Each structure stands twice: as structure tokens, then as C-alpha cells.
Amino acid sequence: MIGCACPVCASRDARDQRLRTSAWIQAGPLDLIIDCGPDFRQQALRARVPKVDAILLTHEHNDHVSGLDDVRPYNFKSGKDIPIYAEPRVGQEIQKRFEYAFEEVNRYPGAPMLVSLPISASDPFAIGDLSIVPVEVMHGAMPVLGFRFGAFAYVTDMRTISENEMEKLKGVEVLVVNALHFHAHSTHMNVDLALEFIERLAPRQSYLTHISHRMGLYEEINPSLPAHVALGYDGLQFRV
Ligand SMILES: [Zn+2]
Ligand SMILES: [Zn+2]
Ligand SMILES: [Zn+2]
């Protein structure tokens, strides 16, 4: 957190240095990115992401979309537009914020090349051979999307979920889910709510993400979690 001197912000442990929440999914030949926030450039350089075939957006908050301009080098390398899969509301919002990147004629040659592909919480879709089930969760009053890829699901910025949507997550083996810190919050789950949610789904392994500096130090908090739950950290990799 800019301007903060708390133990987490002052920590030298790399696992306490929390950039904005995002994920890189490799599925067969596909490289997919979930959310593209203001730290995307730094994250893509650090993880050496070689290409981006598509971006899935959970919602339009700036910490999830404001890095979209930085996908330009992938456009220059491939010569192709990058498809952005998002709900219509989210697609329209990013076309407003990054209007220059969606121009079909006379697009500035240095601009990112994006194309918006609308998806809906009620319709599973596919990218190449990969089937994706969108799951609607509530971010306070705002519906946002989580995504299920077979045995793996990724859910962020959730506060509540309906029973119907919960059904779509049944049987998931590995789960990434948001937990801000230990305090109550109106639009995010805290640790207690995230653990309740995890308990209902009982995946083999869960990772917490979208972690605030107020969560505390990795070294102190991670051992206090149940055995099948871990704090996520920047650069964490796993195979499903
Ligand atoms: Zn801090
Ligand atoms: Zn949000
Ligand atoms: Zn967020």
C-alpha cells in the first residue's frame, strides 16, 4: 500500500509483496490471463508470459482492468487482436475506457488491439478445446464472474453467491478464492467467510487471493490456516 509502513508493507519476504490479483493459465497450447490490472506489465515481465491468446475479465474495477494498454507487445508479436471475454456491461465499460484500442478503422499503429467478446453467466463457452463455465458471484451489489475450468475454479471479489451458482462449483478439486483480511467488509469475503465457502465445496486444495496488507505476514498467517488452505502469493504456480 502506497505510503504504508505496516509490517507487511515493510516486509522483505517476497510472499508479502502483493501486486494486484491476476492469473496466467496454461491449457494445452493456450495462454490465458484472468484480469489485467495496473500491475500486469510487471507481472507479465516477471513471469515471462510469452503470449496471450485471450483475456477473461471478472469485472470492470480498475484493479482488474487498468493494465489492458500494456498488452501491446503481444499484439505487435502476433499481429492479431487479443479477445477480451467479459459480460456485456464489462465489455462496454472497457470499450469506453480504452476506446482507442477497439477502433476498427484508423487505429493508431502503436495502440493495443483488443476485441470484445460478450459472455454470460448462464452460458458455458470454449476457447479452443478448453471449456469454461462462468459462475456469477456477488461483489456487494455488483454481479461479477468467476470461472471454472474442469477441476479448477477461480473466484475473486466475491462477497456472496446464490445456491444455483454454488451448484456449478460442486466437485471442484483446486480452488482460488478471495479473502481480503480478517475484518468484515461489505463487498469482499474476509477469511472466516472464505473458509466457510471452502468448507462447503471441500476442494482438495484452496488458495486465498486478493489479499490486503491488513491480512498480516505470510509467515504468520499461512500456518494458521486449515491444512488444505494456503495463502496465495505473487508468483505461486500449481498444476491441476
Ligand atoms: Zn501496509
Ligand atoms: Zn472489485
Ligand atoms: Zn478487486
Image (spheres, grey):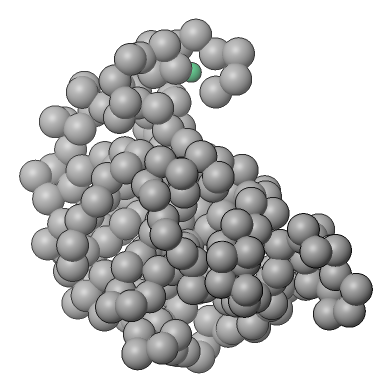
Which one is nearer the viewer's eye here, 194 or 23? 23
Residue 69 shown left or right of residue 104 in the figure: left
Residue displayed at 58% across by 84% down: 120
Nearer to us in this view, 86 or 237? 237
Q: Residue at x 65, y 58 (%)?
A: 72
Residue drawn at point x = 35 percent, y = 90 percent: 129
The outermost residue toward the right is: 106
Count of all numbered marks drawn on residues in the image: 0
Q: Position of residue 5 (x, y in %)?
A: 49, 8
> Residue 218, located in which quarter of the rendered image?
top left
Where is residue 115, by image quadrant?
bottom right
State left or right for residue 59 relative to residue 28: right
The location of residue 112, given as percent across then percent down, is 71, 62
Q: Position of residue 59 (x, y in %)?
A: 61, 62
Q: Is residue 97 above or below residue 167?
A: above
Give x and y (percent) for residue 57: 56, 66
Q: Residue at x 53, y 58 (%)?
A: 35
Q: Is residue 123 above or below residue 21?
A: below
Looking at the image, residue 62 sits to the left or right of residue 16; the answer is right
In the picture, which quadrant includes the C terminus? bottom left
In this rendering, the answer to whether 146 lies above or below 133 is above
Q: Is residue 164 visible?
A: no
Name the quadrant containing residue 126.
Answer: bottom left
Q: Quadrant of the N terminus?
A: top right
Q: Is residue 107 visible?
A: yes
> Seen from this angle, which residue lies furthest left?
227
